[in-house]
Amino acid sequence: MHEPIPDQPELEVDRLLAEGDAAALGAFFAALPPGEVQRALDSLPADDRVRAIALLDPVQAAGLVDRLPDVHAVDLVERLDPGTAATIVQELPSDEQADLLNELDDEDAEAILAVMPPELAQETRALAQYPADVAGGLMITEYLAFSDRDRVQDVIDDMRSNAERYRNYDVQYAYVIDSNDMLIGVLRLRDLLLARKADVVRDIMIQTPLSVSDSDTLDQVHDVFEGVSYFGIPVIDEERRLVGVVRRSAVERAMGDRTEGMYLKSQGIVGGEELRSMQLLTRSRRRLAWLSINVILNLVAASIIALYQDTLAAVLALAVFLPIISDMSGCSGNQAVAVSMRELTLGLIRPSELYRVWIKEISVGLLNGLALGLLLASVAWLWKGNPFLGLVVGAAMAINTMIAVSIGGAIPLILRRLKLDPALASGPILTTVTDMCGFFLLLSIASALLPLIT
């Protein structure tokens, strides 16, 4: 029977730290769900988090680091001495090693690599050279590969003699290479076990296996996995040499991380992942980067209202519709941004196809603008009994919707052409621009028809 999880697991961690009971601390962390592990560590002072990691044996510590958000893992490893950090890092899967060291300061990363075994350090450096969003940056180097000239007995003997080393490998298949390390086949373990001991591997392997290039993008690799049910696919370099295996789980995690990153940027957090356990000044700086720009844009929007304050004073009902028009147009614009970003990601459009994207978006904007404009015009007419007020409100809504989808569809392409992040298109800038247009349209049309709506 499992012990119940305490309401405040950080108190139990505190107690075990005070007792210095490494075994009990490791068992306690292992019993916690991932979210509770993060919460328990997040509630501890930074020095106590470091003590907790350092107290565990390297395998347990690596398992714990692997369950933490990246910003927590990086902070913890940076605070450890290089020797302790190296023993933990080398217990992580190879792709996690490279990702973690890439997030560290160069000085900290080099200090850790200097303590690691030379062969492992060299391998980790090689993996760290790949961008994070290509197959080479996603792959692991823990896989089984055998020569096409090996006999079945040779393969079985190797697996038995290296059982401890292979125990943590995600073994579904073994890969077959030639004398130049080129991938030429895949060996199913079922076929291996059922074959005669004297059989040669090349006679029982699956020839011309599916593979991806180490330079293939995340989206290309994801598309390959979409068409098959494999847990992993071999990765080859430009000379078809086997260099690693990319796992489905790594691709799905990377897709999720990218989506989360885009969402954070679209909401005005441009420095990456933010957690409330991070330093106050760091969190403040990341948010202010957008908020300061947004203040200026909002002052411009407010100045439009100030220019038409006489119109607004004459027809106070317009004030009710200002936030509705700006909000609905912002929503329409964000929908267009989302579609453009998705199509850019999938390679369905190029940054040069502005006109085609605009035609597609303005068509949707015209239909949706007319529908929303008619709805809002009807509400204004029924409320005040003035059809001209409905005309003003409806026209502003329809036109601003078309403007919003035009901007939302186009800005990601423009930013991509300028080699900037398309995620910057949504959020504060798009919303504020549509606010300015909505305020101007409603108040300028109202001013032109003022005698008819007062």
Image: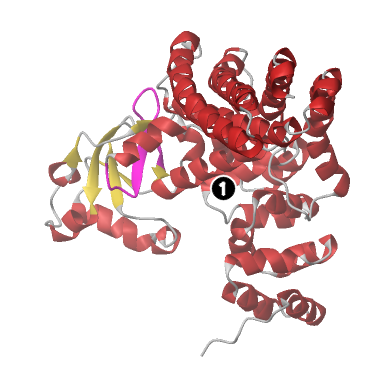
The image shows residue 197, relative to residue 48, as above or below, that is above
Residue 388 percent coordinates (x, y) = 62, 23
Q: Which residues are magenta?
A: 228-245
* Residue at 28%, 48% in the rendered image: 229
Decide: is 422 above or below 414. below
451 vs 22, nearest the viewer:
451
Residue 313 in the image, given as x and y percentages of width and height: 84, 27
Can you see residue 338?
A: no
Residue 442 lies within the magenta run: no
Which residue is at the front of the view, 173 or 314? 314
Badge 1 is on which residue?
A: 96
Q: Position of residue 83 (x, y in %)?
A: 73, 54
Circle 1 packing at 10 Å, graded few (<14), some (14-19), many (20+), is many
Q: Is residue 229 magenta?
A: yes
Please state if 314 lies on the left or on the right of 184 as rendered: right
Residue drawn at x 71%, y 46% is 112
